[in-house]
Image (cartoon, rainbow, N blue to C red):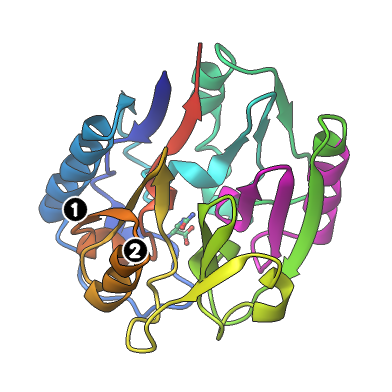
Amino acid sequence: MLIAITREVSPRLAACELSFVEREPIDVERALAQHHEYQRVLTTLGCEVRVLDTQLDMPDSVFVEDVAVVLDEVAVMTRPGAPSRRDEGASIAEVLRRYRPLRAIEAPGTLDGGDVLCIGRSVYVGESARSNATGIAQLRAILNEFGYTVIGMPTHGCLHLKSAVTALDNETVLLQPAWVERARFEHYRIIEVDTAEEHAANVLRIGAALVMPACFPRTRQRLLDAGYDVTAVDVSELQKAEGAVTCCSLVFTAA
Ligand code: CIR
């Protein structure tokens, strides 16, 4: 069974953290509707969606990906790089502890789940403004125990590693070469985003299917031409909060 943890959009979404995108008005009602459609798509693709209650005073709490890293053997609660986001994880830990042994990143380490890209037994971690060397070293120590290799990856010009690169399957990545060094992924088949679609590299993998934002038709066509099954969702209001598709769920298998 595939479980997807999500959280309802906070009515205070417009007060979100922003790093690389300009603040513009966010229509929260529309964000809610788009988020509901996103959850419906996850259900269609076979996920059982567990929706957590809104956290009214936590503007970014819809972006559940950042507070935990869930692998088959273990879940690691992160310590998000933005201090305003450090309380988002507690209620998610309560759910995750039913499914996985829990570990945690401790101060002064910081780590955002958006920086963690797992492909098979390789775990790439963005050396971003949100994930520091101590946090990455702690993650390495935890995951080495379970047979994973943790590889630090410099990013530039984007919020998280998964803004710049995501996996389409265990052999192929979708990559924005302006934000992460292409050569570091050359042992995979690489599909680049269309140059007109800067933010298109963030794609959510659900089994063999892919979910991506509707506003990147050229990159979507590249994926369709490569034989992938792609579902587009309109997440424009969540993108204004510097989110995309991976960040709105934590997807994992459960017995
Ligand atoms: C933040 O800056 O933390 C939020 N406004 C956006 C987080 C998006 N998270 C993600 O892509 N993993």
Give left or right: position of 218 versus 192: left
In which image quadrant can residue 146 be found? Answer: top right
In the depicted structure, whether residue 156 falls above or below residue 132: below
- Camera-side residue: 169 or 20? 169
CB at disc 2 and ligand 1 closer than 8 Å: yes
**Where 109 falls versus 227 (above or below)?**
above
Where residue 10 sits: x, y (%)?
A: 28, 44
Q: In the picture provided, is 89 more to the left or to the right than 126?
A: left
Give 81 or 43, whichever is nearer the viewer.
43
Q: Earlier in the sequence, mark 2 or mark 1?
A: 1
| Residue 126 lies within the magenta run | yes
The residue under the point 34% across, 63% down is 241
Q: CA distance from mark 2 to mark 1?
A: 10 Å
Can the viewer see residue 58? no
Under mark 2, the amino acid is: Ala
Q: Are marks 2 and 1 in contact (CB under 8 Å)?
A: yes
Percent x, y of residue 139? 79, 43
Q: Residue at x 26, y 72 (%)?
A: 221
Of helix, strand and loop, which one carries label 1? helix
For the residue marked with disc 1, what is the amino acid?
Ala
- The part of the chain drawn in magenta is 113-141
Do we see residue 190 in this rendering?
yes
Quarter where residue 145 is shown: top right
Query: Mark 2 sits on what residue?
Result: 241
**Which residue: 86% across, 38% down?**
144
Q: Which residue is mark 1?
A: 31
Res. 100 mark: none
User: For the residue carrying disc 1, how many other residues have a C-alpha within 10 Å: few (<14), some (14-19), or many (20+)?
Assistant: many
Ligand 1 near label 1 (Cβ, under 8 Å)? Answer: no
Depth order, front residue of 227/210: 227
